[in-house]
């Protein structure tokens, strides 16, 4: 369990501790979805595909934002860059506990467009923190957070699996290869959330009812060019069927791994 | 010109850095240009980047760069890209690379493609392939800007030594003030980290309990492999969380992935299906993992795993 260590220093102006947090959420196909493409392999075939809120956004980024708000006060706002089909995941985020939501009404072409739109809303509002997921599980980009931080000239704490706020100083643990890096930073900053940052919350009936009346603002996008284009998709070649080796033939398995697969 | 940002740990060029350099050198060959390496912070042997094909090395040794910060590093990399007139900026798709690429791309007004698998097709600009939908498909991504920032997926390319030490030039870009204080790094000692491991031995609920992991560790030791596990195993505290692979854990792409007593649920496969070769050991012939496997052993893991360890030991003896 991640615990919250946001202690309110006596004599500190409580209002200055309030945190307004913007949480980026994206919808992705459920991982169990069968992936196929249409329009000459240029578009995902969404027929029969169930969409979910990107797990890193829902389970970790959003929940940690809510925990901070619950401890120090403030506001949690969701933001999604996407078409009307996103309203459903924004309502889910509101049901989990976010206060309001903004949807930028466009199908983004690339990560940069997403980052630019979110940056525009950050500048227009008064946010102390922006939380994102560590990556989108569909395009596995891990690009938006860094771009957004650069556009805002804010620090970027990526792959955070622990965040504690103490007054104006945040201590963040960040996943790196084979270990964890601990850093200190003061708001404002952009953070991307990994497993460990919080525990998943399931919306309850009351939350779901309340979500229906919470504000969801739809904003027109800014014009601008994309910098990359997902031109076409291919499915991997079917794996040839598995080669079975009898449980008492382990020397043969080792030989195959050496001579045929060449991985030993 | 191809600029490669080379990651170091403890001053040494990391494997991820060697892979990025090899990718950069091959890309430079393809684009008929040269490959320049950029090393940031303390480094024991920056000239060593030449072994992987860099024709020269820029070394920014400013102490401000000894600890990582994405904003600082990105400004140094972008400055080097401008100075060298780089058309491609290449780095590893590592924890640091992922936090840098987007920043560098914004600074250079460049298109960014992360976790690329192949060299780009340069016939009509720059089009490059990457895995999407958790490894269930590949996408071809076109870069629409004059400059491209690419991160190279781990284990997508084998480091190749092609040369010798390269000349090192000191590089002193103007740096912004530090905003993030690095307080410490906790490393799991002695192990090859999962994302970099070439061989991974992974086990699931079929192990019955944490007390049985000895046979898994022994197999891993014999192979020089890193150990991993399925999510329920980490969730129930049988193994540490950093071993959890899959959709919600770490995604890996080793050369060899050995799955022991793991059923092969789609969320598990999402993190491991990019492995080059998959061996599955499971007593249930209907386990879904066999459909994703190259080699399979239907049998009781408590018998099969020690036998496999023995067989590897024997094969080493015979050389
Ligand atoms: C949203 C979501 C995200 C998830 N993310 C992940 C993730 O990131 N990673 C992940 O791993 N899972 C994830 N899961 C869970 C996943 O769906 C499976 O439940 C999980 O992978 C199963 O773990 P397992 O294979 O170890 O256990 P089981 O499914 O219980 O399989 C145990 C296997 O061991 C075999 N076995 C038993 N005894 C023996 C024996 N003596 N010898 C040989 N074989 C034996 C059995 O035949 C069986 O196939 C996620 C689930 C959801 C819903
Ligand atoms: N279209 C979008 N709208 C809102 N947030 C997004 C969008 N795309 C990505 N994000 C956020 O950025 C994170 C990283 O995404 P990516 O860079 O695509 O891997 C996601 O987990 C989201 O929090």
Image (cartoon, grey):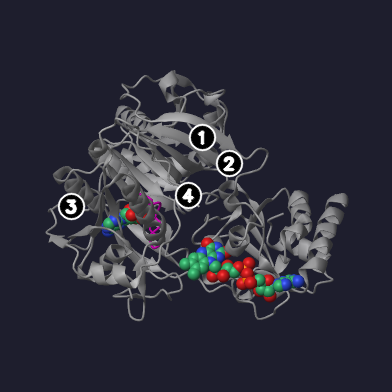
Residue A2's disc number = 4
Q: Closest to the observer: A32 or A186?
A: A186
Looking at the image, residue B76 sits to the left or right of residue B159; the answer is left
Q: For label 3, count other residues whose C-alpha is less than 10 Å away and answer few (under 14), some (14-19) or many (20+).
A: few
Tell me residue B314's x, y (percent): 87, 55
State the separation of the CA atoms marked 1 and 4.
Answer: 46 Å
- The residue lying at 45 percent from left, 51 percent from top is A194
Residue A244 vs residue A89: left or right?
right
Pointer 1 and pointer 4 on the same chain: no
Cα–Cα gap, marks 1 and 2 = 9 Å
- Prevalent SS, magenta region: loop
Distance, label 4 to label 3, CA atoms, is 41 Å
Q: Which structural element holds mark 1?
A: loop
Q: Which mark is residue A225?
A: 3
Q: Are marks 4 and 3 on the same chain?
A: yes
Residue drawn at x 27%, y 63% is A94
* CA distance separating discs 3 and 2: 38 Å
Q: Is residue A135 magenta?
A: yes
Mark 2 vs mark 4: give the one in front.
4
Residue at the disc numbered 1: B53
* Mark 2, residue position: B160
In the picture, residue B24 is in which quadrant?
A: top left
Dot 1 alpha-carbon crowd within 10 angstroms: few under 14, some 14 to 19, many 20 or more:
many
Percent across and percent down for residue B253 are 56, 56
| In the rendered image, residues at marks 2 and 4 fall on the same chain | no
Q: Mark 3: is the Cβ under 8 angstroms from ligand 2?
A: no
* Circles 1 and 2 in contact, beta carbons < 8 Å: yes
């Amino acid at each position: 369990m991640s615990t919250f260590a946001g202690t309110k220093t006596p004599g500190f102006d409580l209002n200055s501790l309030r945190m307004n947090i913007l949480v980026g959420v994206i919808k992705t196909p459920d991982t169990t979805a069968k992936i196929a493409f249409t329009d000459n392999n240029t578009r995902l075939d969404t027929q029969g595909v169930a969409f979910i809120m990107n797990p890193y956004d829902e389970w970790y980024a959003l929940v940690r934002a809510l925990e901070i708000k619950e401890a120090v006060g403030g506001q949690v706002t969701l933001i999604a860059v996407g078409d009307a089909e996103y309203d459903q995941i924004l309502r889910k985020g509101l049901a989990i506990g976010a206060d309001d939501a903004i949807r930028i009404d466009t199908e983004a072409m690339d990560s940069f467009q997403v980052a630019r739109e979110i940056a525009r809303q950050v500048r227009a509002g008064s946010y102390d923190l922006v939380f994102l997921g560590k990556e989108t599980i569909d395009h596995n980009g891990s690009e938006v957070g860094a771009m957004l931080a650069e556009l805002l000239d804010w620090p970027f704490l990526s792959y955070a699996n622990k965040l504690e706020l103490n007054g104006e100083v945040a201590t963040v643990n960040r996943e790196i290869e084979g270990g964890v890096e601990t850093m200190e930073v003061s708001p404002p900053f952009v953070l991307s959330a990994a497993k460990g940052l919080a525990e998943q919350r399931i919306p309850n009936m009351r939350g779901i009812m309340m979500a229906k009346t919470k504000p969801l603002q739809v904003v027109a996008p800014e014009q601008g060019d994309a910098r990359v284009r997902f031109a076409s998709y291919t499915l991997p070649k079917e794996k040839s069927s598995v080669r079975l080796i009898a449980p008492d033939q382990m020397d043969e398995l080792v030989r195959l791994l050496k001579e045929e697969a060449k991985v030993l | 010109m191809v600029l490669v940002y080379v990651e170091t740990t403890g001053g040494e060029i990391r494997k991820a850095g060697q892979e990025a350099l090899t990718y950069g050198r091959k890309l430079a060959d393809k684009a008929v240009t040269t490959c320049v390496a950029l090393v940031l912070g303390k480094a024991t042997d920056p000239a060593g980047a030449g072994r992987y094909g860099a024709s020269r090395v820029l070394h920014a040794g400013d102490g401000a760069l000894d600890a990582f910060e994405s904003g600082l590093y990105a400004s140094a990399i972008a400055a080097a890209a401008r100075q060298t007139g780089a058309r491609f900026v290449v780095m590893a798709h590592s924890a640091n690379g992922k936090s840098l690429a987007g920043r560098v791309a914004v600074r250079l007004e460049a298109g960014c493609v992360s976790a690329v698998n192949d060299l780009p097709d340069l016939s009509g600009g720059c089009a490059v392939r990457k895995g999407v939908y958790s490894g269930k498909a590949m996408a071809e991504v076109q870069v629409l800007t004059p400059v491209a920032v690419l991160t190279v997926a781990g284990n997508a390319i084998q480091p190749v030594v092609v040369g010798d030490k390269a000349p090192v030039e000191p590089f002193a870009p103007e740096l912004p003030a530090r905003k993030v204080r690095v307080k410490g790094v906790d490393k799991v000692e002695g192990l090859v980290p999962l994302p970099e491991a070439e061989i991974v031995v992974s086990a699931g609920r079929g192990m019955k309990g944490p007390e049985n992991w000895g046979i898994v560790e022994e197999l891993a030791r014999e192979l020089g492999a890193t150990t991993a596990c399925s999510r329920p195993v980490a969730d129930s505290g049988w193994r540490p969380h950093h071993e959890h692979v899959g959709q919600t854990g770490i995604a890996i792409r080793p050369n060899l992935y050995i799955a022991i007593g793991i059923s092969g649920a789609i969320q598990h496969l999402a993190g491991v299906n990019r492995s080059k070769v998959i061996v599955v050991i499971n007593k249930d012939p209907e386990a879904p993992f066999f459909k994703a496997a190259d080699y399979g052993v239907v049998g009781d893991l408590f018998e099969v795993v020690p036998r496999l360890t023995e067989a590897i030991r024997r094969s080493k003896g015979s050389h």
